Amino acid sequence: MANKKVRVLVAGAIGGVLYQCNDVVNLPDVLVKQYAEAVDSNKEAVAYALSVNGNVVTDYVAPVEAVAVDPVAEKIATPVAQAPAAESTEEAAVPAVQGDSPQE
């Protein structure tokens, strides 16, 4: 697959990667055709962009796809710690604080 040096005309995502206006990127020909309205491969356009961006050329690197996680499998694989059960109902009861009970 051949690459072509292009000037980015509009800030946004190209092939899943964010670029700014006047970035110069080495893009695969497929993406140059797909994003024809957002990039310019004209030599003068590329030369202008290089003059304003400090002669920086970026090589396109396809983003890594996000790995889908199965939430059900995740719950099965990750045991939840449980609090120990109280030995008697008296231990589980919250002690009353003086002054909490209604006065008669």
Image (spheres, grey):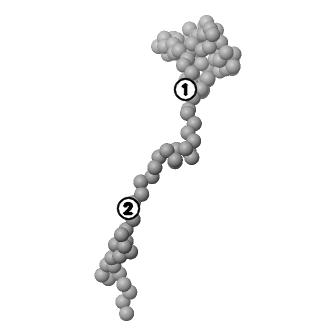
Q: Nearer the viewer, residue 91 or 21?
A: 91
Residue at position x 65%, y 12% in the image: 29
User: Image quadrant of residue 25?
Assistant: top right
Name the secondary structure under disc 2: loop
Instruction: Measuring from the top left, give residue 102's x and y in whole percent.
Output: 38, 86
Closer to us: mark 1 or mark 2? 2
15 and 10: which is toward the camera: 15
Q: Earlier in the sequence, mark 1 or mark 2?
A: 1
Decide if residue 66 is on the left or right side of residue 84.
right
**Residue most toward the bottom?**
104
Seen as rendered, the residue at the extreme top is 43
Nearer-the-camera pick, 74 or 32: 74
Q: Which residue is the site of mark 2?
A: 84
Please tell me how crowded label 1 is: few (under 14), some (14-19), or many (20+) other residues with Cα within 10 Å: few
Q: Position of residue 57 (x, y in %)?
A: 51, 13
Q: Position of residue 24 (x, y in %)?
A: 55, 15
Say what amino acid the circle numbered 1 marks: Val
- Discs 1, 2 touching: Cβ within 8 Å: no
Q: Is residue 94 visible?
A: no
Q: Circle 1 sits on which residue?
A: 64
Q: Quadrant of the N terminus?
A: top right
